[in-house]
Image (cartoon, grey):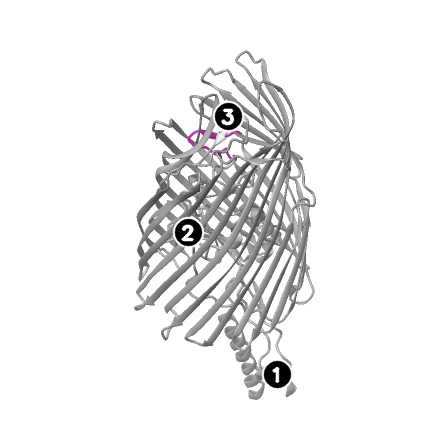
Amino acid sequence: MNLKTIAVTALTLISYLNTIYAASAVVETADTTMTAAPTAETDTVGAAGYTDLEDFVIVQQKKLVESDGAKLTYNVTEDPEAGSSNILEILRKVPGVTVDAEDNVKVNGQSSFKILMNNREDPMLKGDLKTVLKSIPASSIKKIEVISEPGAKYEAEGVGGILNIVTDRKQNLSGFMTQLSGWVNAWQAGGYVNSRFKANKVMLDATVNYNNGNIWPRWSTSDREQEDLTGGPNHLMRTHSRYKSGWDYVGANFNMSWEPDSLNLFTLSGYYSFNSWGNDSRENRTMFGNDMSVLWNMNRNGRNRGRYNGFGFSASYQHTFGREDHTLVASYEYDLGHNNHFNDYVTEAIEGEITEAPWSRSNELNNYGTHVFQIDYSNRLNKHNLIEAGAKMNLNPTDADTRPYFGTGPDDAVMNESLRVKLSQFKDIYAAYASWSGTFDKWNLKTGLRYEHTRMGLKYKIGEYPDFTTRLNDVVPNAAVSYNITQGSSLRAAYQMRISRPSLWRLNPYVNVMTPGQISYGNPDLKSEKGHNVSLAYSNYDGSKITGGAKINYRYVDNMVNDIIFMKDNVMNSTYANIGKSHTVSLDLNGDWNIIPDLRWSVYVSTSYTHMMANSDMLKAKRCGWQFYGNTNINYKLPCKVRLSAYGGFYTPWIDLQSRGSQNGYYYGIGASRAFLKDDALNISVNAGNFLPTHRTNGYTQSDETVRFTSHNRYSQWNVGLNISYKFGGLKASVKKTAANIEKESNDGGQGASQGAGK
């Protein structure tokens, strides 16, 4: 080999290596495969008559689950079933998240948590949360984060922590791109369109989601018993009902970023959301006396409908002071929403001693508004010290009007003014925070303090209830220390405090009398509950075949808000009160095993022991017990771009002060996907789950000294699905975001899921 040949070969190698280095500098680690393109030098060499070297291929497989003890990340892009699933289905596989048979979501065992989209509370998640999560395709999601230790920068709301759904996909090219996706399964059908466009320094992104869950509704059955333990004449009421549910969802949003230079960034975004839901039911109720003789019997049909419309926009400006980690961000967001919900009941037949209107309706009208002003400052003083500080003003006015109607039918029904409640709720939150992070050799320290002043209350325009105003002052500290044992493993100890404010529907004292033998109402005297968490975690994600982590946690919740039931005047009352205290010790284990390069197995298990008690005039109770939850995922990559997967999970019944789930739960599924065309532009996936047995049963029991209430539901959960996704165009750059995103308080108190799972 002569000197010229050696020189040309060396030049070619250097060109390829430079290309690889430049590309890898802008491709985030989530990219699993990249092929280096020839540079200008290699083209010149080829033109001179020399043969190009074959392309270099860099392969890096990202873990399905990652955790550092403070935050656990489930990389949805690594789940083959994401193409034919929705977010709610994916959440069943996320460690630290449980979804029961009625689609109630819990985070770290708590139904009080905060849910964010791209690090901020997204108004598109309002309305019926279960329906919205069912309507957003998992193919539009990059990762789901379970943040157990949010730190001072985040809102203090959410005893269970934060569930953050990340949709932004950062890639490395420029041009234009559109992605189309459509899916159909045994429950629903829908589609998803996303387009991105870049012109000079302006980037645009627009997305439209549609989902129809009314196409194939399924009937389910419910059996309930209400037993009076006080010896009253109405000893036992049995209810059998048959119902079917459906939903419809449309969501649209756009994002724009303008970067006039390297030091300034402007962003603008807007959204529109429409969410409707409802169910139809047929019901039979029978009341028995102490000798089990029939006192009365009735048949009625129910019609439940709800509709939510919302729109809003946000804008932010970021200035960078010469380096990336020294920034100042100012943000503003405005949102407006309207919710209309009603329940109709038509009485078909009555026997015995009961008076019930032939037709009744409970109509709830709610209007939401939000103004959020926020400023955030970040400065890395040196390689050891980072400081962050900020302030926020969050204004949340809400109007609610609950109207009960009674009559022989909708045409002659008259509103009962004595039962009507019309009110305004205000919840204004003023917050400031400061935090410090330090890195010293293998030690990492972080501490922060957040102060939140809350002014919240109710003003009644109609209704014989006193107005009230509550002012809360919460100082929320956090601290953590971690030691990097190796480059990929660490040990972390932390303390975190979280709070949970009562929601409007828990504060509203409106008395719902639509159910014979039962009444329900809120409690305007509720206060915020506080949770304290102390944890010790070990994580090892050093790139070896087997990685994972372990975490032991102690949680103490004071002044816990509980839903309670009791008998009064032969009627079961249901309301809420700050009467509980709980102590929970939990152990979480997760592991990821790359058995061979194309076969991966991940496992998550969690076990906890909880002790709860209440000692008040309203309730004296104590309950303790063990709970277990676990899931597993197996993914296998075959030749020809085929991927197979299987998953399953199991959980024991949940417990509360007055209630306990009646049965264990489980789920499972299998899936397959195949990519086609250049750059995997076309993707087709199929999945199936929970197909045997065809019907499931779940339920719960709630009781105190005066009443026992049981419920059992039988439903069909099997599912099969098909998803087709196609993308075209060359743009793969994402709309830029400022360093700090707005997080605003939800108008329902920041509760991420239905309170009291299973109810």
Say which residue label 1 marks.
43
Q: How far apart are the alpha carbons under marks 1 and 3? A: 78 Å
In the picture, which quadrant includes the N terminus?
bottom right
Question: Given the image, on which type of amino acid does mark 3 rest?
Answer: Phe
Of label 2 and label 3, which has the lower sequence position? 2
Q: Is-magenta flag for residue 653?
A: yes
* Element carrying mark 1: helix
- Residue 295 position, x and y percent, is 58, 16
* Magenta-drawn segment: 652-662
Q: Main secondary structure of the magenta part?
A: loop
Question: Given the image, on which type of amino acid does mark 2 rest?
Answer: Ser
Q: What crowding class fits label 3: few (fewer than 14 Cα within 10 Å), some (14-19), or many (20 or more)?
A: many
Between residues 38 and 474, which one lies in front from this camera angle? 474
* Element carrying mark 2: strand
Between residues 224 and 721, which one lies in front from this camera angle? 224
* Element carrying mark 3: strand
Q: Nearer the viewer, mark 2 or mark 3?
A: 3
Question: Given the image, on which type of amino acid does mark 1 rest?
Answer: Asp
Where on the picture, by quarter, is residue 698? Answer: top right
**Dot label at residue 709:** 3
Res 26 seen here: yes
Q: How far apart are the alpha carbons under marks 2 and 1? A: 46 Å
Of label 1 and label 3, which has the lower sequence position? 1
On screen, residue 453 above or below 614? below
Residue at position x 40%, y 44% in the image: 459
Q: What crowding class fits label 2: few (fewer than 14 Cα within 10 Å), some (14-19), or many (20 or more)?
A: many
Determine whether, in the image, residue 240 is placed left or right of residue 68: right
- Residue 692 position, x and y percent, is 66, 36
